Amino acid sequence: MPLLAPVGEVIPEGISLEGRWHLRVAGDEPDARAGQPAADGVIVPDRRNRGRQSRQPKDGPSVHVFLETGSDLKVTQTDYGLFISFDRSVVEEYRFREHRRVNVGPIEADRVSGWADGRYVIQTLDVQGALLTETYSLQDGGRQLVRTASIVHKEREILSLQQIFDRVK
C-alpha cells in the first residue's frame, strides 16, 4: 500500500473555519445527501447504517465509509486541530499535521491532514489503495464554507463532489 505524505507545513494566520454552517442546495443541482447515488453508483454513506458497511467486497474500495455527510456542520478550530460535527450526531477530529491509523469497525485506513494553500486537506487511504481527499476552504469573505471530496481508486475517480455551506448567523 502506498504511504501518505504529511500535509502542510504551517497553520495559516487569520484563517478560521470555525462556525455553524448550513448546506446550500440549489433546485437545479444534484443533492449529495446520504444514501443517494453519486458518481459511478458510489453511495455516499449514511451514518445510521455505519455498522452494516463492513460487508464491503474484499476486492473493492472501502474508504467511502470514512466520508461523513450532513446538512448542518459545526466547526470548532483550536490551535491544534479541527472538530467537525455533522448534524449534531457525529464529530470528526482532525489534528494539524496528523498522520495516523483510523478505523470504522474492522475497516482501517491511513490518514493525514493539515493546511495547504489556505485549505484544510484530509487524505484517507484504504488497504485497497483507494484515496479519499477532502478539503475545506472559505470563500465570499468567509461567509461560505466550500467542501470538496473525491475518491480515486486504480487511477479512476469514482466520486467527486462539492458542497457549499452558508454561515449561520
Image (cartoon, grey):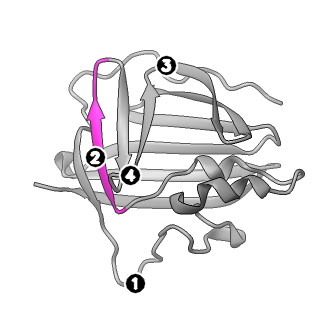
Gap in angstroms between the C-alphas marked 4 and 1? 28 Å
Gap in angstroms between the C-alphas marked 1 and 3? 38 Å
Q: Nearer the viewer, residue 84 or 147?
A: 84
Q: Which residue is mark 4?
A: 89
Q: Nearer the viewer, residue 33 or 14?
A: 33
Residue 125 x/y as whole percent: 70, 37
Disc on res. 97? 3
User: Quick check: 137 above or below 27?
Assistant: above
Q: Which residue is mark 2?
A: 74
For label 3, count other residues whose C-alpha is less than 10 Å away and answer few (under 14), some (14-19) or many (20+).
many
Amino acid identity at mark 1:
Asp
Instruction: Please report the residue visible at 48 percent of the width from the left and 35 percent of the height from the top.
Output: 121
Instruction: Please identify, in this view, whether the residue under mark 2 or under mark 4 is nearer the observer.
Output: 4
Which residue extends farthest left?
169
Compare marks 2 and 3 and give the one earlier in the sequence.
Answer: 2
Residue 34 x/y as whole percent: 51, 67
Gap in angstroms between the C-alphas marked 2 and 3? 21 Å
Mark 3 and mark 1 in contact (Cβ < 8 Å)?
A: no
Compare marks 1 and 3 and give the one earlier in the sequence.
Answer: 1
Amino acid identity at mark 2:
Lys
Disc on res. 28? 1
Instruction: Please report the residue visible at 56 percent of the width from the left and 74 percent of the height from the top.
Output: 36
Compare marks 2 and 4 and give the one earlier in the sequence.
Answer: 2
Mark 1 and mark 4 in contact (Cβ < 8 Å)?
A: no
User: Quick check: 28 above or below 51?
Assistant: below
| Residue interval drawn in magenta | 71-79
Mark 1 and mark 2 in contact (Cβ < 8 Å)?
A: no
